[in-house]
Image (cartoon, helix red, strand yellow):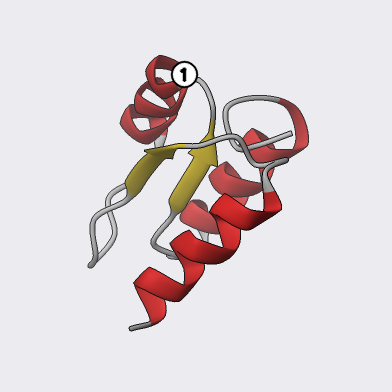
Amino acid sequence: MGASQGIGRATARVLAGLGASITALARDKARLDALLHELPATRSPHRAIAVDVSDTDTLASLIAARAA
């Protein structure tokens, strides 16, 4: 499960409340966008990326691209 619901959503909200900048991943972009509007502002903007978090190859590519 990604950040659009359940434990992932709750974790994003807690971490943002502690000042973390969130990059939320899940398949449902509309739910991710709704989550971002609920999060408190931080120094860096929060991001929403629509992706199937069970697709490990896609996640690996996404992480590699962000690290570069």
Residue beneath disc 1: 31
Please say if 47 is above or below 33.
below
Question: Which residue is at a point 37% across and 71% down the rendered structure image?
Answer: 66
Q: Count the numbered circles shown.
A: 1
Q: Quadrant of residue 5?
A: top right
Looking at this view, name the residue that lies furthest to the bottom. Answer: 68
Question: Which residue is at a point 67% across and 43% down the rendered structure image?
Answer: 55
- SS class, disc 1: helix
Residue 15 vs residue 6, the one in the foreground: 6
Which corner quadrant holds the C terminus? bottom left
Q: Position of residue 34 (x, y in %)?
A: 38, 21
Is 59 on the left or on the right of 65, as rendered?
Answer: right
Label 1 neighbour load within 10 Å: few <14, some 14-19, many 20+:
some
Q: Position of residue 23 (x, y in %)?
A: 43, 53
Is 3 on the left or on the right of 63, as rendered?
Answer: right
Looking at this view, name the residue that lies furthest to the top. Answer: 30
Please say if 42 is above or below 3.
below
Q: Position of residue 30 (x, y in %)?
A: 39, 16
Question: Which residue is at a point 73% across and 40% down the rendered structure image?
Answer: 54
Residue 19 vs residue 63, the one in the foreground: 63
Kind of residue sitting beneath label 1: Arg
Which corner quadrant holds the N terminus? top right
